[in-house]
Amino acid sequence: MPSTPTRDFGQLEYDAHAVLEFPVGLPGFEDETRFVLVERPAAAPLVFLQSLSRADLCFVAAPLSTVDPCYELGITREDLARLELDGERQPHEPDEVICLAILTAPERGALTANLLAPVVINVRTRRAVQAVRADSRYSHQHGLTLCEASC
């Protein structure tokens, strides 16, 4: 089983079939194209998006459905093509895609989630993109609150 050194998890073993391929990297990290999702039961529903080439690069994320149960995908045709999905419709979660919001914890201030550009993973191919929306319906600094929402 392959492994990689990490800052937060020590030497991390991972399944080679679980590697996420980001064909264009992530905004600001265009050269980072291979990641794995690290799940720790004690941190659920949070997950960690760990780079396979940089031990110090790890993003904390949460499923979109836990951040905003009413979230509506708005993936561009270009990103749908990168994901190898039908460009004529938005994919269905969780059958076709897994959607994550990257979280930010500033030194001062509240924890926020990036709903403007969720990470979208094709469950069949493991190809992924940070799908920046073409509209401004959601914020990149969505405040996190504990509440029950109905759609």
Image: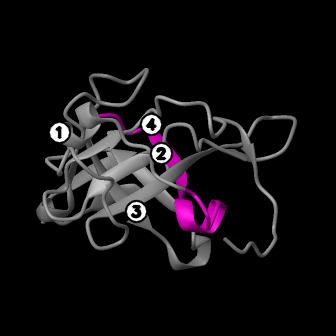
Q: Earlier in the sequence, mark 4 or mark 2?
A: 4
Seen at 57% across and 57% down, the residue is: 71
List x then y, in percent, for residue 44. 57, 73
Disc number placed over residue 56 in the picture, else none: 4
Q: Earlier in the sequence, mark 3 or mark 2?
A: 3
Please state if 148 lies on the left or on the right of 46 as rendered. right
Q: Are marks 3 and 2 in contact (CB under 8 Å)?
A: no
State the separation of the CA atoms marked 3 and 2. Answer: 17 Å
Q: Mark 1 sits on what residue?
A: 81
Disc number placed over residue 118 in the picture, else none: 2
Please state if 5 lies on the left or on the right of 109 as rendered. left
Q: Is residue 7 above or below residue 68?
A: above
The amino acid type of the residue labelled 2 equals Pro
The amino acid type of the residue labelled 4 equals Asp
Q: Are marks 4 and 1 in contact (CB under 8 Å)?
A: no
State the separation of the CA atoms marked 4 and 3. Answer: 14 Å
Q: Secondary structure at mark 3?
A: strand
Please state if 68 lies on the left or on the right of 146 as rendered. left
Q: Which residues are magenta?
A: 53-71
Q: Earlier in the sequence, mark 1 or mark 3?
A: 3
Single out the mark in the foreground, 3 or 2.
2
Disc number placed over residue 112 in the picture, else none: none
